[in-house]
Each structure stands twice: as C-alpha cells, then as structure tokens.
Image (spheres, grey):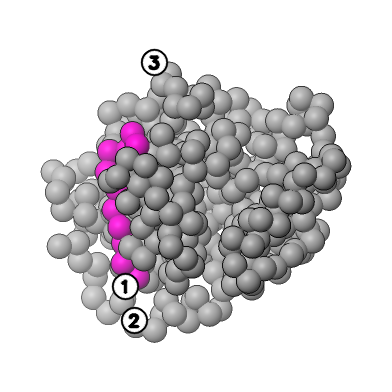
Amino acid sequence: MTQDYTGTTYQDVHDASLRLIGKVQRTPILESSLLNRWLGHRVLFKAECLQPTGAFKLRGATNFISALQASGNIPKHIVANSSGNHAQAVAYAASQAGIPVTIYATETISPVKAAATQAYGAELKLYPTRVEADRAVADAAEADGTVWIPPFNHPLIIAGQGTAAMEALQDHPEVNAIFAPCGGGGLLSGTLLAARELAPEALVIGSEPQVANDASRSLQSGQIESLSGPVNTLADGAATPSVGEFTFPILQELDDFYEVNEQQIAYWTQWLQHLLKIHVEPTSAMSMAAVAAWAVNTPPGQTAMVLLTGGNISQATMASIWQTDYLLQPPTIT
C-alpha cells in the first residue's frame, strides 16, 4: 500500500524517475569485501558521488525543472539558495534546459562548489549569513517569471531525491536497513517513501552532525527545531538551519536516527575513500557511524544500503579530514 505523507507519495517518486531518464546517471552499487568481513554484514553503497555534478542533488533539481517543462510553465529565470551541491545541481539542470539561473549562498560556500556552480553558467551572489542569503532569494523570487527551487522543502525535490533509494532498492530489494544523511531532510524523506514501498521490512535510518543536531532535536520534541546560528562541521551538506514543513512529517516515520561527532565523520571519510577507491564527501561518510552502531546491535549476516550522497570536497576540508591518520588500524565498531 502506498503511504501518503503531507501529500507526497511513492507514486511521486516513481513519476520523478520517469522524468529523469536520460538526464541523470543511474549510479552503480559498490561494496568492500574487507569492510563486510570487519562488520559481519554486507554493506552496499549507492555512489551518487558519480553524478555529473558530483552529488544526488541533481535528481531533485532536474525533477523540478522537468515537471515545469512538462506542464508548459517554463520560467524566464530560476533562483535557488544553497551551500553548494544544490547550487551546482540547479545551475547544471537549468543550463540543460536553457534557463538563466542565479544562486544565493553564504560567503562560506566551499570554493570548489562555488567554482563549479559558476562553471555551469549560474550567477553566484554571496552573503555573510544564511539568513541574509535566504532573505535575498525570497525577494528575488517575487520577480515576474521567476521560479525559486528550494534545496529540500518541496514535494518535487523530495520525490526527485527519492529516486536514488528507488534505484538502489530495485537493484537490491533484500536490504535489511537503508542509511542516508539528513540536512534539510529531502533525501532522507524521499528514501523513506521509496523504502516503505519497495522494501517495507527494511529499517530507514538517518544521521546528522552532532554540532548541527536540529533534526534530532526536532524528532525528540515533535516540532521543528532550528539551529541557533552557523555551525562548523566537516559535513557541510548537513548544516542546514532546520528541516522543512514538507520533510518533517516524513522524517517522523524514521526507524532510528544518530548524531555523529566530527572525529567519526573524519574517520569514516578516510576509510570509505580508502576502501571504495572513490572521492566521498564527509556528509556521505557520516552515515557509516550509524551503520557501525546498527551492526553492533544486529545479528550478523544482514545487508545494509548506504546512500553516498556526494564527492565534492574543498582543499581546506580535505586537509581537516586528514589531520589525523585513521588508517593505521582496521575499523572498529565497538
């Protein structure tokens, strides 16, 4: 039975998948035999870092624009607010559709993500704080013929992001648990919609940085909680101020949720890059802390699916990740 959360359903995810054919990559599933042996479980990785823009965000942005095109409501101008991966995704998808785009971001945006956003043809406007950037994009969206594509809090974004889990579960429906990071909750919401339909017995488990634990606090209090201000975390893709009114009701259906400290984020970023031989963002690797906790408390021999959300890392972040070498001993899960 298709479940309905705030009007967004698995059917929306399925419809999005049809719009994305030929426009995004059906990314591969990777695994490490060494990691499987160490953890006592099979761990599969959906490598969204191999999308053209290096992250899953291309799915939501492309679905949004494709839906506009299908309805004949093609805007004159697109605007978006983002810390990086959504900016690149909207810039790329808009350029493919031939629509001018302006991105509003903070001055702390990752340089590599800023450069890529501009390379895709977007105008980039920077502001000292997230609040100022959000206010500016809201003002810009008032212009005639302009459409604002939000980073997570919209049914079309949720549905588009959910196609990553949909593909993963079509390829491997036997999974016992599926893991994804949480920023604003678009990917994790879409993942839950896909999992409840395609693998209804599987657990859906989220994670976020301990220093940016607004989602965790929201799930505990039963209402949307916000960060008090900017935070400094390696997992910059999960440092959104709060989840949204569309994503939160879906997130409340999660089976478990973990807060992850900065050492764990660096630790698993190193190990995943080493074991999988691909470039993995800290936000992606963060989920492995949740996998390790699940593995300890789960009978051996089960299968986990991890959504590797992106692979765009600045030099400064890479240097921070490697301040300590965690590869001297095999991973521990106790």
Callout 1 amino acid:
Gln
Measure the alpha-carbon separation of dots 1 and 2: 11 Å
Q: Quadrant of the N terminus?
A: top left
For the magenta stretch, what is the residue range? Answer: 252-262
Figure check: 153 above or below 240: above
Q: Quadrant of residue 128?
A: bottom right
Q: Which mark is first along the chain, 2 or 1? A: 1
Q: Which residue is mark 1?
A: 263
Using the image, tell me which numbered label, if any, was put on residue 1. 3
Secondary structure at numbered mark 1: helix
Q: Is residue 119 magenta?
A: no
Q: Are marks 3 and 2 in contact (CB under 8 Å)?
A: no
Callout 3 amino acid:
Met
Q: Which residue is mark 2?
A: 325
Marks 1 and 2: which is nearer the front?
1
Residue 14 can be seen, yes or no = no
Callout 2 amino acid:
Asp
Q: Position of residue 88 (x, y in %)?
A: 67, 57
The residue positioned 67% from the left and 30% from the top of the image is: 19
Q: Position of residue 149 (x, y in %)?
A: 67, 44
